[in-house]
Amino acid sequence: MDKEFNQIEWDKQLRESWLQILRLAAQEDLADTGDWTTRALVPDEAVSKASIKSRSKGVISGLVAIEDTLEFFDPRLSWTPESEDCQSVQTGQCIGFIEGPTQSLLTAERTVLNMLGHLSGIATLTRQYVELVYQTKAKIYDTRKTTPGWRRLEKYAVRCGGGQNHRTGLFEAVLIKDNHLAHGEHTAVDKRFTPAEAVTFARKYVETHVPSKSRKSMLIEVEIDRLDQLDEVLLAAPDIILLDNMCPAELREAVSRRDACNRSIDLEASGSVNLKTVAAIAETGVDRISVGALTHSASCLDLGLDWHSS
């Protein structure tokens, strides 16, 4: 089985996710009345052209959603791209042009810039992490620490930055963490699972309860936070072992033990990962590094709308 989670691309499902958010964004801005300032000051017949420019260096994400966004506000608005998703941009670089009725352009402006800035910020931060580990075999993964409703879009942005997507949701994989061990138990003997026992029980459950179509691609991952748990877990043969908050020396030892026992098991480092520590973590030989900060701490890329004279 390919040990990879579903990787998010711009498709029908992702487009629908954006359209749902777009409807909420419009309701927040316009309620049931509309843009009174624009209506009061801008003639109905006015037509304008504006460019979206980057005010700082970064990586672009979200351009694939602009046409749908503009059409939602007014089908007469047109978009001419000068860049594309995943592309690096420089300060002052033009990303594309919007043309059409001025009233509609003004009304759509903030929604377009909010979406692009947020997703491009995630892509930009992801690219920074990816570049710091490029000489190692480690791949950078996101987590479920995402903005409610925005998960698929934010994971798409991680892909634009060169990162990998961890599981999209609880439905996609088994990930046994310490909280599961604290509350799960052998009902017959009334005792808690060890991480290795939990892997075995979870695998049996998947084999008997999960529909065959999903079962074929369902990965089993287990979290440990001590090296004395590792040898037993390696024998249980999960697809991935998550090494939580281990220092580089512990990670190197884990890699050495894994290599001696079962090289087909991937090791994922998690916890205390930032731009200062990620290179040292990658150099230990782990296969994956999961970084919650990609989606919960990325700053928006600074983008602006520049108006062009008619």
Image (tube, helix red, strand yellow):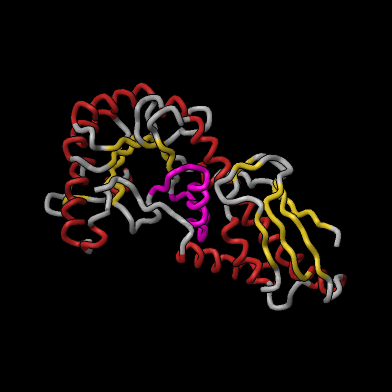
- Residue 68, by quadrant, is bottom right
Magenta includes 41? no
Q: Residue at x 84, y 71 (%)?
A: 46
- Residue 57, by quadrant, is top right
Q: Which residue sits furthest left?
A: 188
Q: Residue at x 72, y 53 (%)?
A: 52
| Horizontal and vertical percent position of residue 91 | 71, 40
Of residues 92 and 195, the one nearer the viewer is: 92
Q: Which residue sits furthest bottom?
A: 32
Answer with left or right where residue 125 lies relative to residue 36: left
Magenta range is 144-166
| Horizontal and vertical percent position of residue 155 | 48, 51
Q: Residue at x 18, y 30 (%)?
A: 261
Relative height, residue 63 to residue 23 (above, below)? above
Relative height, residue 250 to residue 295 (above, below)? above
Quarter holding the C terminus is bottom right
Q: Residue at x 33, y 47 (%)?
A: 4
Of residues 176 and 307, the one nearer the viewer is: 307
| Horizontal and vertical percent position of residue 81 | 65, 56
Of residues 55 and 205, the one nearer the viewer is: 55
Q: Is residue 67 visible?
A: yes
Q: Is residue 27 visible?
A: no
- Residue 241, by quadrant, is top left
